[in-house]
Amino acid sequence: MTHPKLTLVDHPLVQHKLSLMRDGATSSPDFRRLLREISLLLTYEAARDLPLAKRRITTPLTQMDAPMLACADPVVVSILRAGNGLLDGVLDVIPTAKVGFVGLYRDEATLKPVQYYCKLPPELAGRLVIAVDPMLATGNSSAAAVDLLKQAGATDICLICLLAAPEGLACMAKAHPDVRIVTASVDECLNERGYIVPGLGDAGDRIFGTV
Ligand code: URA
């Protein structure tokens, strides 16, 4: 099962960096840096359809009608806590983006998301809203986060995740077929504890050194 709006970014730089991240011997500082770099590259795909309009500018040589972004500032929403590992990469590419946070933790017994925090910028309708969470595993957390974004008015949502499991894509296809998903890999499956295989382990622990 896949998702109708899935973009798989198979660029060699992304794939190389992802392989370094998968290696269990990669240190937390290196893991963080690589995640930020990949995030930047995935954001290019997430932002591919942003509208442009021509604006008259003066170069050192002449005047020209130059293409400029013609939309309200995009919004990036970090799904805590691992989403913070992708946040700075998005802001590197879209520095004017407004930032929101959704706090969800996974109940390890049920694998279902429990919300503990939600702080979103106002006026989400009509703007690109990029939700970031490195691991689309069961899809329950991402689907719940997207529920919150839609309740808050978001109409154009893109989820950036580093890795996706087929189970997570199926969950998102059922709950939110309209939401675009940009990922660097669709892995094989989830294990019995809800971890992506081959995966890279617990992304939050590896980002924040809490292993
Ligand atoms: N969350 C993680 O951090 N890793 C997984 O493999 C699945 C969910």
Image (spheres, rainbow, N blue to C red):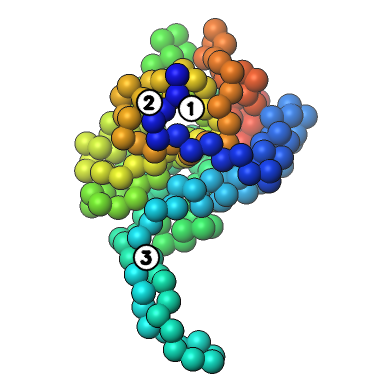
Within-10-Å neighbours for mark 1: few <14, some 14–19, many 20+: many
Going by the numbered disc 3, the residue's amino acid type is: Leu
Residue 141, visible in the rendered structure = no
Q: What residue is disc 2 on?
A: 172
Figure check: 38 above or below 200: below
Q: What residue is disc 3 on?
A: 52
Residue at 26% in and 43% down? 154
Closer mark to the observer between disc 1 and disc 3: 3
Residue 200, visible in the rendered structure = yes
Going by the numbered disc 1, the residue's amino acid type is: Leu
Q: Determine contact: label 2, label 1, CB under 8 Å.
A: yes
Going by the numbered disc 2, the residue's amino acid type is: Met
Residue 80: x and y, percent? 45, 35
* Quadrant in the picture for residue 79: top left
Q: Is residue 113 left or right of residue 155?
A: right
* Residues at marks 1 and 3, CA–CA distance in whole angstroms: 31 Å
Q: Is mark 2 within 8 Å of ligand 1?
A: no
Q: What residue is disc 1 on?
A: 136
